[in-house]
Amino acid sequence: MISQHESLMLDVERQKQETTTELDRGYRQQQIADELLADADAARDTARKAVAKAEDTLREANETLRTLRGTIACRRLNLARGCEFITTYHFKFVKKSHNFNEILKIR
């Protein structure tokens, strides 16, 4: 009876070996998939941190830009006021100089 089923037993043993081999291969592939998933999660976290830093940098840059625009506007206003001041006092000086020259001519 053993000889009759010997080929069947050999076939079952071969299938058992193939099954074990496939299970081992599946286990290795699952490990690789787990590692790749962990790498992908780490990359996603790194990307999220980079995006957050970029958004912070952009926010700071916009605040700096607003500050600079305000500073420039103030400086332009001060420059305009300074020019007006200089022009006013220049005309007063010229007028006084002219009056002084007139006084000198009279004497």
Image (cartoon, rainbow, N blue to C red):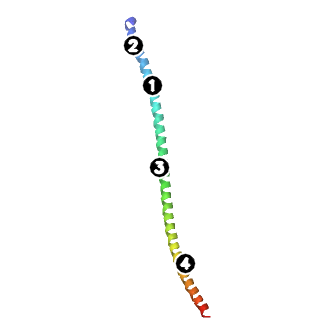
Please state the horizontal and vertical placement of residue 35, each as a whole percent of the image: 48, 34
Q: Looking at the picture, does residue 57 appear above or below residue 97?
A: above
Q: Amino acid at mark 3?
A: Val
The quadrant of the image that shows the C terminus is bottom right
Pick whichever, 19 or 53, lies toward us: 53
Residue at 40% across, 17% down: 15
- Crowd rating for badge 4 (residues with CA inside 10 Å; few <14, some 14–19, many 20+): few
Residue occupied by mark 2: 11
**Which of the numbered marks, if any, corresponds to residue 51?**
3
Tell me which numbered mark, 3 or 1, is placed earlier along the sequence: 1
Q: Of discs 3 and 1, which sits in the foreground? A: 3
Structural distance between the alpha carbons of marks 1 and 4: 89 Å
Q: Amino acid at mark 2?
A: Asp
Q: Of discs 3 and 2, which sits in the foreground? A: 3
Structural distance between the alpha carbons of marks 3 and 2: 58 Å
Tell me which numbered mark, 3 or 2, is placed earlier along the sequence: 2
Q: Secondary structure at mark 2?
A: helix
Tell me which numbered mark, 2 or 4, is placed earlier along the sequence: 2
Tell me which numbered mark, 1 or 4, is placed earlier along the sequence: 1
Q: Is residue 105 left or right of residue 8?
A: right
Pick whichever, 21 or 96, lies toward us: 96
Structural distance between the alpha carbons of marks 4 and 3: 51 Å
The quadrant of the image that shows the N terminus is top left
Residue occupied by mark 4: 86
Please state the horizontal and vertical placement of residue 81, each as a whole percent of the image: 51, 76
Q: Secondary structure at mark 3?
A: helix
Residue occupied by mark 1: 25
**Which of the numbered marks, if any, corresponds to residue 87?**
none
- Crowd rating for badge 2 (residues with CA inside 10 Å; few <14, some 14–19, many 20+): few
Pick whichever, 94 or 4, lies toward us: 94
